[in-house]
Image (tube, coloured by chain):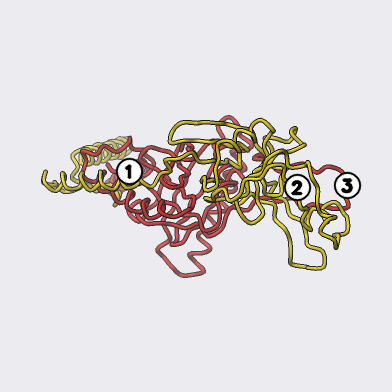
Chain colours: A red, B yellow
Amino acid sequence: MSFLCAMFSIALSLISVSWAAELEVTPPAEFTDSAALQEATRLLEEEIKLATRPQIYALIDLATNVILIKGRGVELHRSSIEKWSASDRSRLATLYRLRERPQIHRRKINPTAGAEQDPISLVDMPATFPLKFSPPLAVLVLANTDGNPWQWTLQRGRVWWHWLMAWGEILRTGDLLPPPSLDLTVSLDDAQSLAWTVTEGMPFLIHRPTP
Amino acid sequence: MRRVLLVVSSGLMGLLLITLVQSSGLLTLNASTVRPAAVDPVSLHARHARYKTLAKRLTQLMPTQPYILVDTARNHLYIKRQDQVMLEALASTGSGTILDRPGDSKGQWIFDTPRGEFTVQSRLTNPVWVKPDWAFIEEGLAVPKSQTDRLEPGVLGEYALGFGKGYFIHGTLYTRFLGKNVTHGCIRLNDDDLKSVYRLAKVGTPIMIF
């Protein structure tokens, strides 16, 4: 009995260490490290392909904790990632295209209304939203809710909803290997501007940190 | 009591053991945190050289001439040359609103500023707005049959820069809306900023919109 309890304790410790490993955010890559150099080279190869064409693309840099919006290799906008976690980093080494942009509430113009209608603004954009990609990758963008318990509660509800939907998809398709997933926590302003910025088909690259 | 102590101490021992093993690098728990095998210096040098070549190639793809940058979320327009900001201006961009096409149950206009990379295709002075169908429908008016009834001078400011599919960077009478998403897809600026953009941008100047 004691032996079983001890094994259970070890298993618990293993799980907690595993969680910690998943949530840790590594410092910027140093190119004296062969793995970091290899990852940076892979990323450059992919980026050059994107930068040769007239298009806007995004780079989620998990090594330096930033989301970059880029075009022709030029950094157009930079957002900080406050926290991130990834389910399977080893599978994030490819080019992803956004399947559809996040649902935003678009107002319909009523020609008979006459009165001036309120313009849309960043406040109207979602603060928690999933991004689905091809090949399959599930990214969940979360706005930082520190100091706002109401927003935190709402966000938890949405996170659970996404989690349930993901499990529903697994049960429906019978595919026991779910797509890799990435949760990104950014500031409220950055989350909402990202929801407005991304477009269907937009290419995304992910820079994975190395130990 | 002894049993509880045994369980707690076993747990702590387990945690200590795992921490030691992890820090020694003998065991990793995440597939992506596998430490690389030792690489010989020649191979590392070759990889460095490859990286430098690629980094240089990417730099060569960056525009060397001034380019226009538009942030539609924050309604700002910039003119940049490499890292230097030559102009920063408050703008108005697409409202993202929807207008139904009358007589077409599925058709609708979506008033977004297009995202992507474009180029300045035309530079106009004293532009005249040729009002499209949606401008009449939006106001609850009938769409005129005559082209001359569509002409509206003086509302686009002194200059306009076309970047394709009927989209322009132009002036506005509604300067109080600068900084807001209120347009039908065009990019509006105040008179002074518009003049600067007109002066700095040539046909072919890249416009990056995100």
- Front in this rendered view, residue B182 or B88: B88
Q: Residue B122: x percent and y percent?
A: 61, 49
Of the 4 image quadrants, the one containing the N terminus of chain B is top left
Residue at 43% across, 57% down: A96
Amino acid at the residue labelled 3:
Gly
Q: Is residue A196 left or right of residue A13?
A: right
Given contact means CB atoms under 8 Å apart, are the residues at marks 2 and 3 in contact? Answer: no
Calculate the distance from the C-alpha at mark 2 to the C-alpha at mark 3: 25 Å
Calculate the distance from the C-alpha at mark 1 to the C-alpha at mark 2: 54 Å
Element type where label 1 sits in the image: loop
Amino acid at the residue labelled 2:
Val
Amino acid at the residue labelled 1:
Pro
The chain letter for the residue carrying disc 3 is A
Element type where label 3 sits in the image: loop
Q: Which numbered marker is on residue B128?
A: 2
Viewer-nearest of discs 1 and 2? 2
Residue at 57% across, 31% down: B88
Query: In this figure, which residue is indicated by the disc labeled 3?
Result: A114
The chain letter for the residue carrying disc 1 is A
Q: Which numbered marker is on residue A209?
A: 1
Given contact means CB atoms under 8 Å apart, are the residues at marks 1 and 2 in contact? Answer: no
Q: Residue A10: x percent and y percent?
A: 29, 44
